[in-house]
Every structure is written in structure tokens, then in C-alpha cells.
């Protein structure tokens, strides 16, 4: 019971001490003649294209390879 109280106190202290980290003022707008005519997003509006699909595809491929190697390792009737 005592360890639960200690863990709860540590959790509450860490939780409430992290709030000041989240608050930041937005950056000021660019001065006249700086950059393009319109205020754009950081990065110049570069397209993301197919990049969000790369990591999930790699993860699926990695999982398939691991499954295939593990499945063949313990197959019935296989020696090795």
C-alpha cells in the first residue's frame, strides 16, 4: 500500500510539473519584404506525398520477415 502511495505522489508531481513546458507564445509574423507575399507554413509548403506510408510499410515488411523466419524454424518435419 505504501509503494502505491509513493508511486501516485511521484506521478502527480511529474504530471503537474510538466505543464509549464507546454505553454509558449507563437513566433512573431515576418516583417514586410521577408519571404513570399503570403505567410506560409514552415518548410515552404513542401508536399509530403507518400512519405507517411513508408514507416508502416517497413514495419509490415519487418513483421512478415520475422514471422516467416520463425514459422519455418519450428515447422513440423523440418530438420535444422
Image (tube, rainbow, N blue to C red):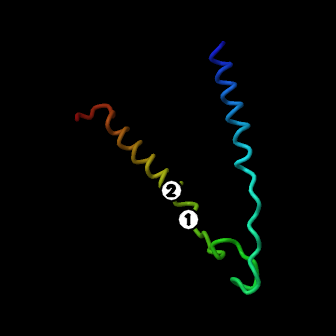
Q: Position of residue 70 (x, y in %)?
A: 37, 38
Of labels 1 and 2, earlier in sequence is 1
Helix, strand or loop for disc 2: helix
The residue to which callout 1 is attached is 51
Which numbered circle lies on residue 57?
2
Tell me what residue is drawn at x 69 percent, y 25 percent.
Answer: 9
In the rendered view, tell whether residue 42 sits above or below residue 62: below
Position of the C terminus by quadrant = top left
10 Å neighbourhood of mark 2: few (<14), some, or many (≥20)?
few
Q: Position of residue 32 (x, y in %)?
A: 76, 84
Q: Marks 1 and 2: CB-CB under 8 Å?
A: no
Q: Nearer the viewer, mark 1 or mark 2?
A: 1
* Distance CA(mark 1)–CA(mark 2): 10 Å
Position of the N terminus by quadrant = top right
Seen as rendered, the residue at the extreme left is 80
Seen as rendered, the residue at the extreme top is 1
Q: Nearer the viewer, residue 78 or 14?
A: 14
Q: Position of residue 64 (x, y in %)?
A: 44, 47
Q: Nearer the viewer, residue 48 or 69?
A: 48
Q: Nearer the viewer, residue 28 or 76?
A: 28
Q: Is residue 37 left or right of residue 6?
A: right
Residue 68 falls in which quadrant of the image?
top left
Tell me what residue is drawn at x 73 percent, y 37 percent.
Answer: 16
Q: Nearer the viewer, residue 75 or 18?
A: 18
Q: Position of residue 43 (x, y in %)?
A: 63, 72
Q: Is residue 77 left or right of residue 58?
A: left
Amino acid at each position: 500500500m505504501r509503494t502505491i502511495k509513493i508511486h501516485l505522489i511521484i506521478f502527480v508531481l511529474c504530471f503537474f510539473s510538466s505543464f509549464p513546458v507546454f505553454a509558449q507564445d507563437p513566433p512573431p509574423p515576418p516583417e514586410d519584404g521577408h519571404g513570399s507575399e503570403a505567410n506560409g507554413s514552415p518548410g515552404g509548403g513542401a508536399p509530403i506525398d507518400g512519405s507517411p506510408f513508408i514507416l508502416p510499410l517497413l514495419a509490415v515488411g519487418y513483421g512478415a520477415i520475422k514471422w516467416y523466419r520463425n514459422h519455418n524454424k519450428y515447422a513440423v518435419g523440418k530438420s535444422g
